[in-house]
């Protein structure tokens, strides 16, 4: 998003965050579903997306159009958020679509937050992402855009049904549908990060050759929190190929102290 679009989205998100403390998890889940349904409509109906973001039309005119299209199919709470989005400034129509989808995801995560489940949802999304990343056949089946989303969602439900929170499953379906234009794995990663952000945390992706003890993971998390001045959510992946040591990624920062990297550096030095 460009600067004006980021500001427009931030204003709508602030409006949602004002609503969250007074809403129940069920109310937030309803708002999320309605926002995501409208995002789906904007994905399918390109002329509508253009009309609702057309800078040549006034914000009031765009809101009237939105209400004419939706009728009474969206509740008052979701409609107020959609009004704010449609009345705002967007550089290109795709920004309105992305903002609507992101706001729906934020409402979904807020429902887990209100239920006290957000940390668990974050962990479940990460673990499912690991499962998908570790199984090329599964990743291909879930990410095949030639197959209708409904059929791929049935596979997802068979994997997660009864094993994960409903919010986790719904969020994973958003990734399946191409959240923000991403593939399934990247969509799941972004959802993990958004869940962590709602808990005011950074995410540290840690790769080790063998599982860390709980105490070691806590020490690492504490050290990273001290470094970044913010709580850090540690997500650990076990990969024997690193041979030993630890690889940590936090945002754009990479700390690679693995044996595999040292061996690579040694080979490169000898080849010079």
Image (tube, grey):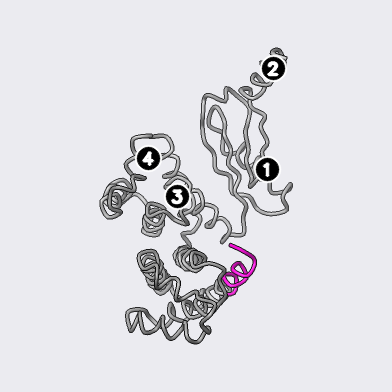
Measure how far apart labels 1 and 4 are at the Cα level: 27 Å
Asked whether disc 3 touches disc 1, contact meaning CB atoms under 8 Å apart, the reply is: no
Is 222 magenta? The answer is: no
Secondary structure of the residue carrying numbered label 1 = strand
Is 6 magenta? The answer is: yes
Residue highlighted by disc 2: 266
Prevailing secondary structure class for the magenta stretch in the rendered image: helix
Residue highlighted by disc 4: 139
Residue highlighted by disc 1: 253
77 to the left or right of 203 = left
Residue 159 higher or lower than 64, as above or below: above
Asked whether disc 1 touches disc 4, contact meaning CB atoms under 8 Å apart, the reply is: no
Measure how far apart labels 3 and 1 are at the Cα level: 22 Å
Asked whether disc 3 touches disc 4, contact meaning CB atoms under 8 Å apart, the reply is: no
Q: Earlier in the sequence, mark 1 or mark 4?
A: 4
Q: How far across and down, in percent of the image, does residue 39 sit?
A: 41, 67
Residue highlighted by disc 3: 125
Measure how far apart labels 2 and 1 are at the Cα level: 23 Å
Q: How many marks?
A: 4
Q: Earlier in the sequence, mark 3 or mark 4?
A: 3
Measure how far apart labels 3 and 2 are at the Cα level: 37 Å
User: Nearest the camera: 49 or 149?
Assistant: 49
Secondary structure of the residue carrying numbered label 3 = helix
Residue 243 higher or lower than 76, as above or below: above
230 to the left or right of 45 = right
The magenta segment = 1-11
Q: Earlier in the sequence, mark 3 or mark 2?
A: 3
Q: Quadrant of residue 132?
A: top left
């Amino acid at each position: 998003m460009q600067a004006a679009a980021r500001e427009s989205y931030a204003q709508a998100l602030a409006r949602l965050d004002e609503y969250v403390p007074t809403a129940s998890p069920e109310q937030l889940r309803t708002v999320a579903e309605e926002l995501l349904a409208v995002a789906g409509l904007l994905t399918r109906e390109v002329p509508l997306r253009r009309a609702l973001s057309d800078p040549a039309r006034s914000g009031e005119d765009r809101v009237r159009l939105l209400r004419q299209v939706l009728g009474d199919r969206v509740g008052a709470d979701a409609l107020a958020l959609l009004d704010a989005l449609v009345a705002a400034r967007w550089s290109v129509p795709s920004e309105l679509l992305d903002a609507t989808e992101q706001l729906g995801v934020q409402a979904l995560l807020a429902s887990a937050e209100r239920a006290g489940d957000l940390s668990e949802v974050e962990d479940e999304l990460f673990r499912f992402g690991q499962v998908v990343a570790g199984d090329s056949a599964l990743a291909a089946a879930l990410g095949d855009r030639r197959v209708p989303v409904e059929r791929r969602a049935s596979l997802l439900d068979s994997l997660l049904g009864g094993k994960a929170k409903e919010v986790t499953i719904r969020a994973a379906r958003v990734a399946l549908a191409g959240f923000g234009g991403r593939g399934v794995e990247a969509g799941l990663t972004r959802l993990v990060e958004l869940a962590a952000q709602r808990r005011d945390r950074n995410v540290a992706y840690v790769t080790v050759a063998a599982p860390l003890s709980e105490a070691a993971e806590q020490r690492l998390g504490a050290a990273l929190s001290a470094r970044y001045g913010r709580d850090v959510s540690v997500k650990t992946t076990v990969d024997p190929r690193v041979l030993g040591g630890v690889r940590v990624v936090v945002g754009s920062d990479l700390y690679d102290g693995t044996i595999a990297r040292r061996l690579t550096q040694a080979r490169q030095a000898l080849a010079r």
